[in-house]
Amino acid sequence: MTTQPDWQAFEQAHVWHPYASMLDPAPVYAVKSAEGVRLTFEDGRRVIDGMASWWCAIHGYNVPELNAAIGQQLGSMAHVMFGGLTHAPAALLAERLLGIAPPGMQHVFFADSGSVSVEVAIKMALQYWQAQGRSGKSRLLTIRHGYHGDTFGAMAVCDPVSGMHHLFADQLPQHFFADAPGAASDEAWDEQQIASFRSLIEAHHNEIAAVILEPIVQGAGGMRFYAPEFLRQVRRLCDACNVLLIVDEIATGFGRTGTMFACEQAQVTPDIMCVGKALTGGYMTLAAVLCTAAVCEGIHADGSGVLMHGPTFMANPLACAVALASLDLLLATPWQQRVAKIEQQLQLELAPCRESTRVADVRVKGAIGVIEMREPMDMGRVQEALIARGVWLRPFGRLLYTMPPFVISEADLRQVTSAMCSVAQ
């Protein structure tokens, strides 16, 4: 067993990190504690977390209400299997989720993580059509630049070029990929934006079980924004072609884009919806798949009545309890005003970066601010420069972006945007 002083050396030698080499690892920074919007490193440096821990810590860290929820639940039951048993935290969380979801969502399946929720959503769609005697509807349609997770079903609907999973291309199911829309607002919309998608769904609807996409904002596949009109058109085409619509709200859900769920901006109700990340306020891993009554009834149409999935830690009571507390805290706070204020500040303070010849684009949506560089960045060098300015971000490729906690102050956000502009210009 390692002693306290040498745990970091052991970790570097033996513990993998996301998308990292084990033999030639990139620098990692040891965190000792987290409070509010700040991380304290083991060496004493403090940084503002402009990433909200990969977009999930919307309330910041060490939140009294969430701490209390975890403690109270821990006193009665940390975990119990969900097979054949149930508990109040799961039921209450499901009720809360359906209460804030788009109209028509009626059923909830709890999963371990965002990637697993995508797997469950795909299974729902496939089982739905099998139960209708339409087993030929077994492929998916999505748009390029998408990202849905790292498990195999999810990888298969990530962009095959920019989705980080090209190594597994030969092992993945082959699905349909339409061109992603380029218009970021309805004002810039034209019908050509939907042409590729319309062509594919009309030609192959007898093979397509479901469309899956990230609504309005595409995350890790490129931090791209698109017009709500595209999503409205997708919904209409799915209805016309008898195809289910799955929206992946894992990154966009719970207020990040300015509405509770991004699909609300298109006034669209999906057939199936995945949520995760901010669901527990960053405290524990938990995700959920919501679906309409029609999907649920369709899955049961052949009399089997069984959705073929069941994670060991499904509906973990601790995770459900803290998720319920996180949603209650979100609903009790002026989150819309906070996100709108963050959006305005990001627009104002990132705008000067457009003048740099090194910058290809600057874009803002809700509490998301993106600087897209013309050339790929040296992530290690950029992160060191950001840390020297008291800011933690996780850039990738040509993208330098922030998705801060909703509770960030104006001064702290200014420090984040100032650091971003400094390294971008």
Image (cartoon, rainbow, N blue to C red):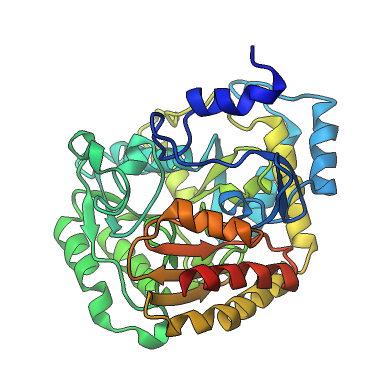
**Left or right, 253 with reference to 269:** right
Question: How far from the left and from the top, in percent, is residue 178?
Answer: 23, 62
The residue positioned farthest toward the top in the image shown: 1
Q: Is residue 187 above or below residue 364?
A: below
**Left or right, 56 with reference to 163:** right
Is residue 11 among what the camera can see?
yes
Residue at 29 percent of width and 84 percent of height = 190
Residue at 74 percent of width and 63 percent of height = 407
Question: Image quadrant of residue 245?
Answer: bottom left
**Left or right, 175 with reference to 36:** left
Q: Is residue 5 above or below residue 250?
A: above
Residue at 76 percent of width and 69 percent of height = 334
Question: How far from the left and from the top, in percent, is residue 295?
Answer: 43, 47
Question: How far from the left and from the top, in percent, is residue 71?
Answer: 84, 33
Q: Is residue 337 above or below residue 303?
A: below
Q: Nearer the viewer, residue 280 or 288?
A: 280
Q: How many marks?
A: 0
Q: Nearer the viewer, residue 285 or 73?
A: 285
Q: Nearer the viewer, residue 177 or 209?
A: 177
Is residue 272 among what the camera can see?
no
Question: Image quadrant of residue 316?
Answer: top right
The N terminus is located in which quarter? top right
Question: How far from the left and from the top, in percent, is residue 284?
Answer: 65, 38
The residue positioned farthest toward the left in the image shown: 203
Residue at 21 percent of width and 73 percent of height = 195
The residue positioned farthest toward the bottom in the image shown: 187
Q: Nearer the viewer, residue 27 or 347?
A: 27
